[in-house]
Image (cartoon, rainbow, N blue to C red):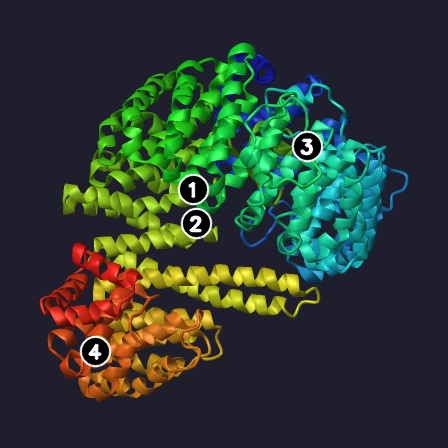
Amino acid sequence: MAEQQQFYLLLGNLMNPDNSVRKQAEETYDTIPGATKITFLLQAIRDASAAEEVRQMAAVLLRRLLSSSFEEVYPGLTLDIQTAIKTELLACIQLDGSSSIRKKVCDVAAELARNLLDDNGNNQWPEILKFLFESVNSQNVALREAALHIFWNFPGIFGNQQQHYMDVIKRMLVQCMQDQENPQIQTLAARATASFILSNESNMALLKHFSDLLPGILQAVNESCYQGDDSVLKSLVEIADTAPKYLRPNLEAALQLCLKLCGDTNLTNMQRQLALEVIVTLSETAAAMLRKHTAIVAQIPQMLSMMVDLEEDDEWAMADELEDDDFDSNAVAGESALDRVACGLGGKMVLPMIKQHIMQMLQNPDWRYRHAGLMALSAIGEGCHQQMESILNEIVSFVLLFCQDPHPRVRYAACNAIGQMATDFAPTFQKKFHDKVPPWFINTPVTLVNESKSCTLPLQVISALLQTMEDQSNPRVQAHAAAALINFTEDCPKALLIPYLDSLVQHLHVIMVAKLQELIQKGTKLVLEQVVTSIASVADTAEEKFVPYYDLFMPSLKHIVENAVQKELRLLRGKTIECISLIGLAVGKEKFMPDASAVMQLLLKTQTDFNDLEDDDPQISYMISAWARMCKILGKEFQQYLPVVMGPLMKTASIKPEVALLDTQDMENMSEDDGWEFVNLGDQQSFGIKTAGLEEKATACQMLVCYAKELKEGFVEYTEQVVKLMVPLLKFYFHDDILYLPWSMPLLLECARVRGPEYLTQMWHFMCDALIKAIGTEPDSDVLSEIMHSFAKCIELMGDGCLNNEHFEELGGILKGKLEEHFKNQELRQAKRQDEDYDEQVEETLQDEDENDVYILTKVSDILHAVFSSHKEKVLPWFEQLLQLIVNLICPHRPWADRQWGLCIFDDVIEHCSPSSFKYAEYFLRPMMQSLCDTSPEVRQAAAYGIGVMAQFGGESYRPFCTEAIPLLIGVIQAADSRAKENVNATENCISAVGKVMRYRPECVIVNEILPHWVSWLPLNEDKEEAVHTFNYLCDLIESNNPVVLGPDNANLPKIFLIIAEGFANESIKGDDDCSKRLANVIRQVQVSGGLWTQCVSALNETHQKAIQDLLNTA
């Protein structure tokens, strides 16, 4: 008894608000053996004399114990104790008078039942099923409620008996949903039905069988909302997300209900937003189904009216801190919904529906409507991209007028719209709206104004934003105008920015100086933070053209870094550090070097204080990026600073995020506002990760990649610790920017080369297994493609012998799986094209999916290329497991991309595995020959390359096929549109292939007949690799004084000079390779015979003459 009392005391301490007391209690609790915990916890739950919160805590802990440690604890208990636990739990539910305790015990029972369902679906606790049936038919409302609660918590409780009991389950739910006397039973029955539907989302027959329960769910949604309970509405959101097709029979009713709830101002904001969330989620998960329903049209004004829900705030315009968006507000919720609906349903449907509403709002005398209209334009840009692009002139001209609006928040919204469109429509936006700048911008002396200027004409973007940045009385608007300018300049092509650079920079400098004075006098910093970033963005785009303005800004920027040391100025200081490093990178080493030492000292001082910085200090990520830019500027000279920068960088890159596996009950106590993000794993479970520090971690990892790339062998001291950090991150799925990490692997191997082959091999072995496993398990296609690319580069770098038998076996299985998945996905897409909801927007989505799949196929090809090129013909037996799948790719009925990449793989087999490759000729030779005349230029190109390598590497067996290919190749080259943009690469590969046949298999053709034509087809301008082959062969012919090429009395030399000049001017040949040296020697030989030289050079235009001179100077 004393032990139990001590345990009660411990439970009380686990709820103690004092952290130290609670922590000590947690440590004590963790030391108690699992079996003992179960005994004590059950006793506490049953003890009616114990305090209710103690009993509740005991139930929560017992559920968590069963959830997290079932396998460690429960099987070790005796059969009697196991039976006692089951009996005790059911007894507690039936006897306890407290509703909250009963619910908590139901959660424990559901968790135990979940764990007692074996792998074959056998429920090893049949008594709980009997209890459910009896309770749901009981006259006792509390027992009916308990049965439904257990079923809601674990809808899979019937296991492999579910089909047998299907009608009983349905009858039970219908009966409870019709219980008019007990609204709580109706609500819980609706939630339990939703939970059952969600757990059987892919069982279409079951969804259809239960479709007549949907009206009851909708009725429960409506009634419970007006009782202040939004739990059923949340279930409806989950159905829209996971099983949207279940809603199809009553979709109109569901939409109308949600629109009604969303528009009812008597409900809470949260309820109205949840109702909107149902529609928005459906626009993402079942867009095609939704597009067919006219009720969807009514949601647009609903979202817009929510966006008008703003309050006057006299302090708003003067705020010096940027608050995060209030995601609980209707305005933000409406804007977010509009963005997602536009992306989900597509611009073709959304823009015509919304355009008229927005135009009316923009003409409304109430500022809130004008603000909402402009924010709506910002929100729909991504989803309505294609449709808005054609009317961008009209939209932008109209929006620019609102930069002069009398209300500051409308001017803010206008800047927001410009900034968003500058990003969404880049670089089209910049190209269209950079010019026609009003004369005042170019000619007027720069002055700051305190009030808005009126303007009869719509100002163009740069000038409009700069004028808005001069709005001294509204710093918040000024700052947002600067933010929009950043968006505009960072995506602006350099050539477009240069004409306005001088005036733009002068304006920014005047504003910066004024705001620096304000900082000193008043301590205000918001506008200065954004102006500093604007300057950085302009410098980043202008690059070396920023050199004349360097001295205008650098003293002030250094002054800010030296003096802005107070805590509230950390963000300003971080942004200024970023600005200095970006300017340094833009102007280059020569201009920056006089300041480099001082800047490095400033950075070093901050770095020295690094350990004193708080974990959330914004300076950290700016510092990390700045160091990497300094590394790019200084090159090898940066190596000396590595000992200082690597410690903090590795510390940040090594951040371990807090993660948790949570069930529904735990989720109710957690919030995304606390920095947690959740992924629903199904079966009432979610995976949570605390995202604090992830952005910094990703940045730090990118910077490590940058150091490895820039410093190469200079980074060798750190390769081992970086590899040990990076390799485990291949399993790290929690941040988008992590996809840069695979790039580091080949770079780190490059760095390690200097340590010798043994060290390099050890490092590769550490990476190799992890890379192969990651290719097999990575779920994100973007990250997967990067890992595959990195793996291929590593194999090329490490060469023959880098993969052992186990590696090959695992890799073969994975690549086979990828190819099989490729074919399966194509079949699924074909099935979707037969779906009743198929329309042209669905086709666009399917095309995107297809492009993703093809991209993965290209990476399979990359890996096979790396394996063939490094291991040669000895890998052919291993390749045979993939052979039939590759043959399937080149079947005539396959899409062109399949045929292209299938042929590319066989090209590699011929190039790297001949003469043994001929044993597979029966599979690829006929398709390759036929593909030379394919309608797809990409397929023709792959086939022509194959003929070229056949001639060069294939051997005797391929001789007749080289002869057969020549007329086909010539036919492609001489086609009327062979040099059209879409055909030129295929044509150039055909020209190169003809050259290779003549060069390596002259017995297959009458060379002298074809040579004059072949020379007339030169040079190759697009395919630089094949251009080198053709120039090398041309050198062979000239050096051997081939009479057909040189012509009588060298009459063809001027033409040859023109070919060489064009090739060099076009960068088809580079000045430092062997081919260039051979061509330069040809020219020098002509140079010594004066008359012939004059004749050749005088036939060239100025550009070509310069190219010849450049070639002579560099080669």
The tag earlier along the polypeptide, 2 or 4, is 2
Instruction: Residue under label 3, please give it.
Output: 411
Q: Position of residue 1077 (x, y in %)?
A: 15, 61
CA gap, disc 2 to disc 4? 53 Å
Mark in front: 4 vs 3: 4
Mark 3: amino acid: Arg
The tag earlier along the polypeptide, 4 or 1, is 1
Neighbour tally class for label 3: few under 14, some 14-19, many 20 plus, Cα within 10 Å: many
**Label at residue 1052:** 4
In this rendering, would 576 be left or right of 743? right
Q: Position of residue 949 (x, y in %)?
A: 26, 74
Image quadrant occupied by the C terminus: bottom left
Mark in front: 2 vs 3: 3
Image quadrant occupied by the N terminus: top right
- Compared with 690, 422 (above or below) is below
Q: Are marks 1 and 2 in contact (CB under 8 Å)?
A: yes
Instruction: Residue under label 1, please give it.
Output: 738
Instruction: Residue under label 2, please give it.
Output: 783
The tag earlier along the polypeptide, 4 or 3, is 3
Residue 54, by quadrant, is: top right
The tag earlier along the polypeptide, 2 or 3, is 3
